[in-house]
Image (spheres, rainbow, N blue to C red):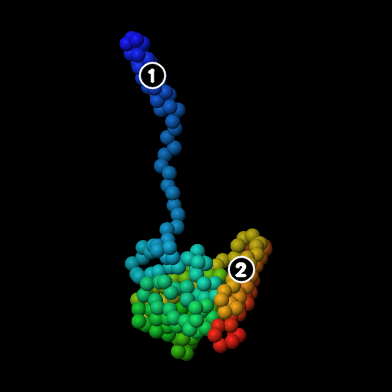
Amino acid sequence: MKLNTLFATLLAVGVGGWTLSALAQDSVDIGDVKVTGQSLGNGHMVQEDSAKARSTVTKEAMDEMAPTANALDKLKYTPGINVSSTDASGLSGTSFTMRGMNSDQVGVSADGIPINDSGDYSIYPNLLGDPENFSEIFATQGSSEIDGPHIGSSGGNIGLVTLRPTKDFGVFVKQAVGSNSLDKSFVRINTGDINGFKTYISTSHTEGDKWRGKG
């Protein structure tokens, strides 16, 4: 019995060693694998590595916020920016300050084109268009860039980046409903690549009763 047990033990060790040796011979070295992705800080902003104080809100983050809010209202969670509105839907007037500076001291541009009022540098957030047409919104707190296209941007600048049209034809439809008879319909049509030319067409309609009747 003792010999049989010893024989079985030696046999098991030998078979196991042979199996490991066979597996080691069948393995192939594929080299290093590099995994890249988009890292979101706090779930809403990308991690910046620039020397200046800069915050970028991605489209994924904007889609999680109120669909009726304007583009500047999407910056309400950005450090250094205080956004206020007369109602939660964002349909009424919106004002903001950046590190204590008023909105007329902050330069705002869309795809590099300044959109501040040429007279008093005021900003009209409700006239910036639907936020569904923007891919990202970034804010540079503090002094503005030297080559920035703004004149009255002593308090920093805000940039809107338009969502580029796709190469393929497509239709995007978005419907939102809420309290106080809030209703928003948004439609965007991408024409696709037509002989090297591509663009998009979008339309929207928003209504809300709020507290003082239909508006």
Q: Position of residue 141 (x, y in %)?
A: 37, 74
Q: Position of residue 56 (x, y in %)?
A: 43, 68
Instruction: For residue 78, say whether it is visible.
Output: yes
Image vertical order of residue 99 relative to residue 18, above or below: below
The residue at 34%/69% (across/down) is: 52
User: In what quadrant of the picture does the N terminus appear?
Assistant: top left
The image shows a total of numbered marks equal to 2
Quarter of image, res 24: top left
State the residue in front, 194 or 49: 49
Image vertical order of residue 23 relative to residue 147, above or below: above
Q: Earlier in the sequence, mark 1 or mark 2?
A: 1
The residue at 48%/84% (across/down) is: 86
- Give the amino acid at mark 2: Lys
Q: Residues within 10 Å of mark 1 (few under 14, many from 20)?
A: few
Q: Would you name the residue on which mark 2 appears?
A: 174
Q: Would you name the residue on which mark 1 appears?
A: 12
- Give the amino acid at mark 1: Ala
Q: Position of residue 95 (x, y in %)?
A: 45, 83
Instruction: For residue 154, say whether it is visible.
Output: no
Q: What numbered label is drawn on residue 34? A: none
